[in-house]
Image (cartoon, rainbow, N blue to C red):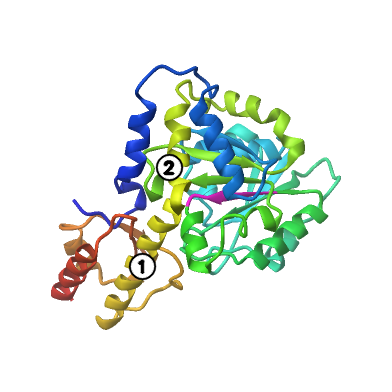
Amino acid sequence: MRSFASDNNSGVDARVMAALEAANQNHAVGYGDDPWTAQAVADLQTAFEAPDMLPLFVFNGTGSNVVGLDLVTRPYHAILCAETAHIHVDECGAPARFTGCQLRPIATSDGKLTPELVRPYLQHFGVVHHSQPGALYLSQATELGTIYTPDEIRALTDLAHAHGMRVHMDGARLANACVALNCSLADLTTHTGVDTVSFGGTKNGLMMGESVLVFDKTLQAEAGFVRKQAAQLASKMRYLSVQFSAYLKNDLWHENAQKANMQAKRLADGLQTLGLSLTQKLETNQLFLQLPKETINALLNDYFFYVWNEATSEVRFVTSWDTTTEDVDALLRTLKSLL
């Protein structure tokens, strides 16, 4: 099966698998007191140009958001996010349950928050009857495939910090955003003032696991306890951490994200030749478009993808690091025959 539903459905890069095999040759002390984890911590600090940043390895994306948000909030806070945000739509209420915070979704046209959209929600500070605005949640890339530039992120972090708030970035597709903007990992995180980041790799060649990057030094003393309470502390930590060393070596993260983005561009160009238009600007590896309902139903017989909006017959295609040119061309041939 070749899937265009999600980059979560892709396989594991052979170089990551080799690193896992190498870490599996002997015993090692558990819970992160092993040489592979120490090396991965150093590799992440180098890649993000942040020698004082604390990386925490966790099991999955929801766990990374829970840990990151729990670190930057108290239960009486409100977390401001786009209405399409993963924490609001796709995480079964886990962030609200673990943090105790109210999620305040904000309507956007493209999945991106702006200072103008956020400002109306910055109110009732000091009033005990209201949840206090405590954190801003950004997805990079967004759930609609769009991306924040460094200046756009900085404008939001400056606004949040001016009001005593902190900023958590969900970087499940941070690699794809860096490739699209020709930026480094540090350009979109360390240099923009974010406080915590979920740095993902599962969608881009890793087997499992994410890392929570804690940039705010005042949060680091509590970080380990928060991870443990969130049930995200792995006993055999080396199998999570060693993947990140392989991921960062020779910029594997960039290579794989570039492949995904390039195949998305090929697919977009092919869709255009079929007379189909995207409903969101193509910036990373997610494509949104409308198809006739009968075409959607027929295409689902051969391909796995998601119907994003039933009412408008909008679908989402996602290319992966291991999507091939033949995968894309075969999908376009099938679509052409159906149309």
- Neighbour tally class for label 2: few under 14, some 14-19, many 20 plus, Cα within 10 Å: many
Regarding mark 2 in the picture, which secondary structure is present there? Answer: helix
Q: Position of residue 90 (x, y in %)?
A: 46, 46
In the image, residue 219 above or below residue 28: below
Which residue, given by chain and number where applicable, does mark 2 sit on? 246
Q: Amino acid at mark 2?
A: Ala
Q: CA distance from mark 2 to mark 1?
A: 22 Å
- Horizontal arrangement in the rendering, residue 86 relative to residue 276 (left or right): right
Q: Which residues are magenta?
A: 167-172
Principal secondary structure, stretch drawn in magenta: strand
Q: Position of residue 165 (x, y in %)?
A: 76, 49
Q: Nearer the viewer, residue 19 or 5?
A: 19
**Which quadrant of the figure has residue 25?**
top left
Q: Position of residue 273 (x, y in %)?
A: 26, 82
- Neighbour tally class for label 1: few under 14, some 14-19, many 20 plus, Cα within 10 Å: many
Point out the tag, 2 or 1, that comes first from the N-terminus.
2
Q: Amino acid at mark 1?
A: Met
Q: Nearer the viewer, residue 298 or 195?
A: 195
Regarding mark 1 in the picture, which secondary structure is present there? Answer: helix
**Which quadrant of the figure has residue 316?**
bottom left
- The quarter in which the C terminus is drawn is bottom left
Q: Which mark is residue 262?
A: 1
Q: Which mark is residue 295?
A: none
Q: Residue at x 33, y 56 (%)?
A: 320
Q: Residue at x 70, y 45 (%)?
A: 78
Asked if marks 2 and 1 touch (Cβ < 8 Å), the reply is no
Q: Position of residue 330 (x, y in %)?
A: 17, 66
In the image, residue 188 above or below residue 239: below
In the image, residue 142 above or below residue 208: below
Res. 261 in view: yes
Res. 74 in view: no
- Horizontal arrangement in the rendering, residue 71 relative to residue 14 (left or right): right
